[in-house]
Amino acid sequence: MENKNLNEKEKSNDATPQRPEGERILNAPLVEMDLFAFIDQIKNEPTWADSERNSITIFKSEAMTIVLIGLHENAELKPHKANGTISVQVLEGKIEFGTEDQYVQIEKGQMIALQENLMHSVKASTESFFLLTLVM
């Protein structure tokens, strides 16, 4: 019998060249996320080998998006703004997070929160993986 659980309340992605295994649930009443499995997945994709960074969206609703981002040592996310409040939680490594007025280093087990529309940048001091949560 076919599983009919994937409905309007649940959202999934289609397979991409970086993720040929196919679908994963992005939005449902309860979404399970194995962060270390996602880190392994990121590390095993061609994008990780070929560029400074790789990421995967692991949850997406109208109100909130969670993205797991991996940066190679010295990789940067140039100054940009987010159109919502964000939190950044480091799972592995150490990053330098800067705004126009403040600069902090955060490492495994630490996190920051940032109000919306503040210009900020990120640089990896070491190979790093962090969760970016955007709340609209």
Image (spheres, rainbow, N blue to C red):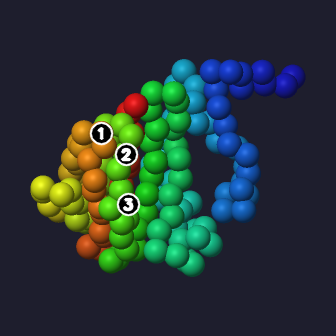
Where's residue 41, x and y in %? 56, 60
**Distance in Å between CA atoms under marks 3 and 2:** 19 Å
- Report helix, strand or loop for mark 2: loop
- Look at discs 3 and 2 and give the one toward the viewer: 2
Q: Which residue is mark 2?
A: 82
Image quadrant assignment for residue 47: bottom right
Mark 2 Cα-neighbour bin, 10 Å: few <14, some 14–19, many ≥20: some
Which disc number belongs to residue 8?
none
For the C terminus, give its image quadrant: top left
Mark 3 Cα-neighbour bin, 10 Å: few <14, some 14–19, many ≥20: many
Regarding residue 104, the answer to whether it shows in the image is no
- Report helix, strand or loop for mark 3: strand
Instruction: Kindly check if marks 1 and 3 are in contact, taking CB atoms under 8 A apart as contact.
Output: no
**Distance in Å between CA atoms under marks 2 and 1:** 6 Å
Q: Which residue is mark 3?
A: 129
**Residue type (three-letter) at the residue carrying disc 3:** Phe
- Report helix, strand or loop for mark 1: loop
Where's residue 96, x and y in %? 22, 65
Marks 3 and 2, the one that precedes in the sequence: 2
Where's residue 131, x and y in %? 38, 49
**Residue type (three-letter) at the residue carrying disc 2:** Ala
Write the residue at 62% across / 36% down: 25
Q: Nearer the viewer, residue 47 or 4?
A: 47
Write the residue at 30% across / 48% down: 88
Relative to 90, does residue 5 appear above or below in the rendering?
above
For the N terminus, give its image quadrant: top right
Q: Which residue is mark 1?
A: 116
- Look at discs 1 and 3 and give the one toward the viewer: 1
**Residue type (three-letter) at the residue carrying disc 1:** Glu
